[in-house]
Amino acid sequence: MKKNKFLIIFITIVVICALIIIGVLSIKKFIYEINYANKINNILADTQEIEKKWLIDKENIPYDLSNAEVVEIEQTYICFSPEIRVRKMNGGKEYSFAVKTNITEDGMTRDEFEDNITEEEYNNLIKKKEGNTIRKTRYQFLAEDNLLAIDVFSGDLEGLAYLEIEFENQEEANKFQTPTWTIKDVTSDLNYKNGHLARYGIPKSYFEYIKK
């Protein structure tokens, strides 16, 4: 009889502990999702894009990407000067239109206008295509209060992978130190901007960087 009581108590304790763990994990996930949404909203609220970019080895990423937001992107330019591009995301679940101008000498800052468009608008705009369509898988997530986007390219750009971080302000960007696991900071190198990739493909310097 005593053994049964102890067993019941033990099972009760295990169940309570399990419920507590589940509750804590749920709260953590909830808080993360709120912080993630707030970070995106804060960045999108500004018409200026402040972004740093690094070349990376896609086999050497120190994050668990299984929890990241995954977006399949087809990016097509309809003008290179000024830079105007459209995107088809996740096979047509969402479409967007963007204009980017006034890039700074360090390649980190530029004015940006972006908005969602309809499938019909996308199909009309894509008829004006210039260069090649860029295809990439984006893994986006929050890490140490920074919004990280890891882009893994496919098709003509197979093998290329970037880490991009968009910042809320210039001070935040200037303070951020290059992660030790990245290959090269290419923020200021226009050869690694997506518009250049759409025109000329993978830069020759890429193959030198990955050998080091």
Image: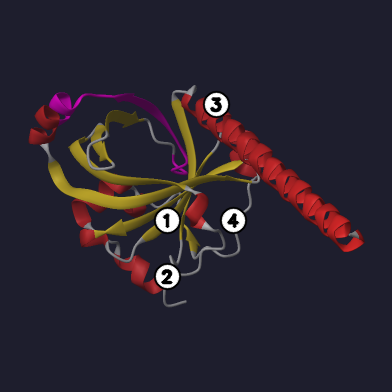
Comparing marks 4 and 1, which lies closer to the viewer?
1
Give the x, y percent position of residue 175: 66, 44
Q: Which image quadrant: the N terminus?
A: bottom right
Query: How far apart are the two marked residues, 2 and 3, measured between alpha carbons?
Result: 34 Å
Residue receiving disc 2: 209
Q: Which residue is mark 4?
A: 178
Q: Residue at x 37, y 30 (%)?
A: 102
The three-letter amino acid code for the residue at tag 3 is Asn
Q: What residue is disc 1 on? A: 162
Residue located at (24% from left, 50% from top):
134
Instruction: Give the alpha-carbon distance from disc 4 to disc 1, as whole Å.
Output: 13 Å
On screen, 198 above or below 44? below
N-term-proximal mark, 1 vs 2: 1
Residue drawn at x 75%, y 44% as measured from the top left? 20
CA neighbours of label 1 inside 10 A, class few (<14), some (14 to 19), many (20+): many
Magenta residue check for 68: no
Q: Amino acid at mark 4?
A: Thr
Mark 3 = which residue? 42
* Mark in front: 2 vs 3: 3
N-term mark: 4 or 1: 1
- Mark 1 and mark 3 in contact (Cβ < 8 Å)? no
Magenta residues (range): 105-122
Amino acid marked by disc 1: Tyr
